[in-house]
Amino acid sequence: MAEKSLYRYRIEPQEVDFTLHATIPALGAAILNTAGTDAHGKGFGIDALNADNHSWVLSRMAVEIDARPEQYDEYTVATWISDYGRVLSTRNFTLTDAAGHEFGRAVSQWAMIDLQSRAAVDLSWVGREHAEAIVAAEPPTDKPRKIRSVAPTERMQHRVVYSDIDFNRHVNTMRYIEMMLDMLPLELVTDPAPMRLDIHFLKECRYGQTLTVGCELRPRGASFEVSGEDGIAAVRAAIDWK
């Protein structure tokens, strides 16, 4: 069995808001970058998969942040894979400050797609060929929950442009989260209380599409649904502050 992998980061000026604390998308980006770096180092990163016309895509993710670090703070992201399934693989994370105190955690579930058909493929072979990458440690929090329905009280439209798309040519996860946060009151987005984000991807959104982002606001959080021109939900998410 493998051990957890550790990656060190620092909160840079472009990653903070006007409170001089790291933004939720900045911390989320570090989490996903850690996943990519670790997969690459273990031989099943995007580069290796692309050679067979395959790629990783994020299916679901849950992120908990107890406190947002300040500008120039150093922190460590630990990551480990706890299981491979036929359809989804579970990768986990903890975020620890320079003093060794855990201030965040995440659980992500990944699928593999064929880049030509855009359909999910059986990833059992990854579990067989890279079984040594599995760490005998449970996820640090509850796995991502499904958001089954959203009743938006507000809506906005967004056309998918070049800066929205990632290496898979669909909308980047953090861009979705930024769109959602932009619909919330400023005092809620910058609230220092512990928060949890759950996001669930149902279908891809691609360059040139016009998206409708719906927000169902609650006193201490919100639920979101992103849909394309066909009105079918592509992404659902929920954010809650304690």
Image (cartoon, rainbow, N blue to C red):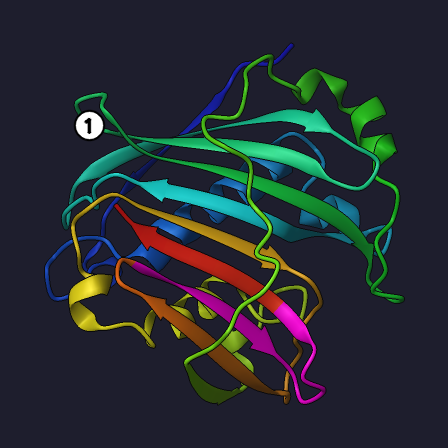
Q: Quadrant of the C terminus?
A: top left
Residue ID at (37%, 41%): 64
Q: Residue at x 55, y 43 (%)?
A: 144
Depth check, front residue: 33 or 82: 82
Q: Give the residue number, with chain letter if any, for mark 1.
A: 98
Q: Is residue 18 above or below residue 2?
A: below
Q: Is residue 178 magenta?
A: no
Q: Quarter holding the N terminus?
A: top right
Callout 1 environment at 10 Å: few (<14), some (14 to 19), or many (20+)?
Answer: few
Where 52 sits versus 183, above or below? Answer: above
What secondary structure is found at the residue carrying circle 1? loop
Q: Which residue sits at x=57%, y=56%?
A: 147
Q: Position of residue 9 (x, y in %)?
A: 31, 40
What residue appears at the point 80 percent right and 41 percent down from the top-left corner?
87
- Between 239 and 103, the residue placed more toward the observer is 239
Vertical relation: 100 (above or below) 205? above
Magenta-drawn stretch contains 233:
yes
Residue 193 image position (x, y, % from top left) = 19, 46
Q: Is residue 196 visible?
A: yes
Hey, what amino acid is under mark 1? Ala
Quadrant of the rendered structure where residue 236 is?
bottom right
State the image quarter where residue 43 is shown. top right
Q: Is residue 160 visible?
A: no
**Total count of labels:** 1
Name the chief secondary structure element in magenta.
strand
Q: Position of residue 212 (x, y in %)?
A: 54, 84
Residue range in magenta is 221-234
Please name whichever residue, 61 or 127, is drawn nearer the observer in this view of the structure: 61
Whole-percent x and y of residue 70? 14, 47
